Structure formats: C-alpha cells, structure tokens
Amino acid sequence: MTDELPERARGAFDAHDAYAAADGEYVIETIAFDGRVTVEDLGPEESDRSAGTDDRALRYVLTVRAPTLDAAVEEAVGPNLRRGWFETYEIRLEDAPGAVRADVELEELTVEAVEGEAVATFVFEFEDAERAPDVAKALAEYAEGTYVEGIVPGYTYRPPVSELLARAQQSGGGGDGGDAGGPMPL
C-alpha cells in the first residue's frame, strides 16, 4: 500500500491478525496459497458511493495464486482433465461473494493459468474499510476451500496441496486412531 491510501484502509489491514504488510500490499497469512490484497482510493469522481471523502468506497484487488492441477501432482495429467479441472475451478469461484457476510458485488473476477498457477483476481469496491480485511480474507478462504473440493483422487500431491490434504484428514478423524489412510475428505 502506498502513503496516499486513506489511514482507515491502512489501519484496518495493519490491525488485522491475518495480514502482514509487504511491498505495497497485504499478504494473507491464514491460507496455504499466496493471497495478496492491494487497495486503491477511487477518488470522489470514480466512486459509486461518494457521500464524502471519508465514506467513499475503496477498490480492493485480491489475488490468490494456487497451483494448477498438473503443477500440484507428481503424475502426468491429460489435457481434458487439466482443462475440465481449470474450468470447474473458475466457475465455482464465481460464487465466492455468497460466502461473505457482507453485500459484495465483484467488479471483476479473472482466473488465468500462468506458469503452473491458477491465478484468481477478485476486484471489488467496499465502503467499510474496517470490514474490508474480513471480506478479502473470506474470499481468499473460499478460493482455497473451492480448490480443495476440486482435488482429484488418485494422484500424489505436492506441497502445499499435500499439506492441505493432511490437515483435512487429521481434522476428519484420521488422527484419533481411525484409518488415516482412508478416502480423501472431499
């Protein structure tokens, strides 16, 4: 974030325990993937809600980088499965605003495959700077959960996906003497 940002945005992210400031953006530390948020002051002429300088909406850009299916597994993945997995991930992410406990309308959602990563970018305006870190965190957690739901059984996964699977198996009862080698929790 830059010095031009309103103190209300800077203060809200600095005070939130899920974020760390880094290179002009805020890194979400509660997800396994790389999640980063930047904030832009729209100015009174751009904001849809320009009631006053302190009340206008800010534009938030959340980027979540997760490995594509073929980058996440040890084995080879056929082109149809790669394409189908990616398209399904992209379609499911469109529902992300429904997971947020606030009225959030995405200005833009893009999901691109870039060098072995599925890069999801959520762009939204939000007026309440104090709640915006929670909104961005919920969107990032939704992206991570959606990714986990789309894990294809039968492959050997690399970190960080293998770590997510291990955590899910432990919380699913595998650590209490049950069958830790049982089916993956999907």
Image: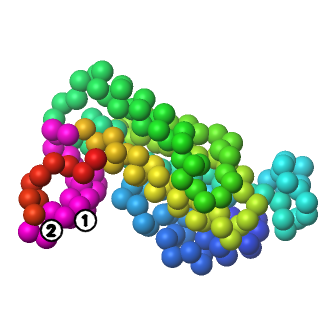
| 39 or 57, nearer to the observer | 57
Q: Which mark is residue 76?
A: none
Residue 86 location (% of width, % of height):
39, 32
Above or below: residue 76 compared with residue 102 = above
Residue numbers of the magenta segment? 153-177
Above or below: residue 45 compared with residue 171 = above
Magenta residue check for 155: yes
- The Cα–Cα distance between marks 2 and 1, rounded to whole angstroms, is 7 Å
- The residue drawn where x is 79% and y is 53% is 42
Residue 21 location (% of width, % of height):
55, 69
Residue 91 location (% of width, % of height):
48, 34
Left or right relative to 103: residue 98: left
Residue 23 visible, this angle: no
Q: Amino acid at mark 2?
A: Gly
Above or below: residue 147 compared with residue 30 = above
Secondary structure of residue under mark 1: helix
- The residue drawn where x is 68% and y is 64% is 2
Residue 94 visible, this angle: yes
Crowd class of label 1 (few under 14; some 14 to 19; many from 20; radius 10 Å): few
Disc 2, disc 1: CB below 8 Å? yes
Write down the residue under mark 1: 171
Q: Answer with the quarter of the image where residue 88 lies.
A: top left
Q: Residue furthest bottom?
A: 15
* Colour approach in the figure: rainbow
Q: Answer with the quarter of the image where residue 29 lies.
A: bottom left
Q: Which mark is residue 175?
A: 2
